[in-house]
Image: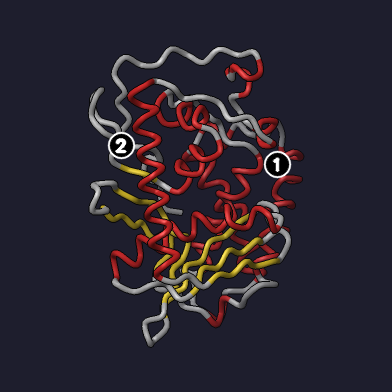
Amino acid sequence: MAPSPPDGAGFGPAGDPPSALSPSRAADFMICPLLYRFRVIDRLPEPPTEATARGTLVHAVLERLFDRPPAVRTPEAARDLMVPEWDRLAAADPDLAALFSDDSEREGWLREATAALDGYFTLEDPRRLEPAERECYVETVLDSGLRLRGYIDRLDVTPAGDIRIVDYKTGKVPREAYEASALFQMKFYALVIWRLRGRVPRLLQLMYLTEGEMLRYEPDEADLRATQRKLEALWEAIEKARQSGDWRARPGKLCDWCRHKALCPEFGGTPPPLPEATTVLA
């Protein structure tokens, strides 16, 4: 699995405008500006959880699986990759290595991760696919100067040039009311690909492996223009918050899962002082 780029806004010295945005940080600000601040400006540590580690491992295994010849991209081959990939990831990241207190705890977690991996094979047959790119880093600059970037799990391209953007998810399928939020990341990537390649992706495909379900969407130019307007308006809001120092919390249903809840004023906490000079690398 390719290393992620630094996943935040590209603030230079204090007073300079921000310059870069990823889908995850855009989603953070829309959910809660204070969460965005904690992650991008304060850069508060967030050690991996069992859920995030499961996603990291399954993504890594699927990437390695496509390194193999098509005929041997089988469920058994994927399962055989699980332990070696985990060992490799844990050796590179002490936080991952420290996630489990004993072998039995790790084995139980590996069984859950393997179940998510098995779900992938209920959705498609990798022996019949040859991805154009995997863990594909993309970046483009809008006319406004805003830089959009991130990693796409997989790009498939037909001989006719039609593009499919694929993203693997190990979490739950979103309820219908939250499908638009789930597709926001995919439209972000579709906008970047359109600008880079001059062609609107034919299909956006979210694969929910644990539950064996897929969410598909066919974007058009109007969708992607609307996404660009939304992102530029979002940057204006981020810049206003940066200039004013007003990163207010937005309480909601996700607060109980926030790892910084103890610092949130809505729950009696106190955020750390804002840095005098905000220097967050893009």
Which image quarter holds the C terminus?
A: top left
**Circle 1: element type:** helix
Residue at 51% of width from left, 55% of height from top?
184
Residue at 32% of width from left, 43% of height from top?
20
Q: Quadrant of residue 225?
A: bottom left
Q: Quadrant of residue 205?
A: bottom right
Seen from the viewer's position, the closer of residues 94 and 132 is 132
Give the percent coordinates (x, y) of residue 125.
Answer: 61, 78
- Left or right: where does residue 98 sit relative to residue 42? right
Q: Are marks 2 and 1 in contact (CB under 8 Å)?
A: no
Using the image, determine if residue 25 lies above or below residue 182.
above
Mark 2 vs mark 1, CA separation in Å: 37 Å
Give the percent coordinates (x, y) of residue 194.
Answer: 34, 67
- Left or right: where does residue 192 sit relative to residue 74? left
Residue positioned most to the bottom: 160
Mark 1 is on which residue type? Arg
Mark 2 is on which residue type? Gly
- What residue is shown with label 2? 10
Upstream in the sequence, badge 2 or badge 1? Answer: 2
- What residue is shown with label 1? 106
**Circle 2: element type:** loop
Give the percent coordinates (x, y) of residue 165.
Answer: 47, 67
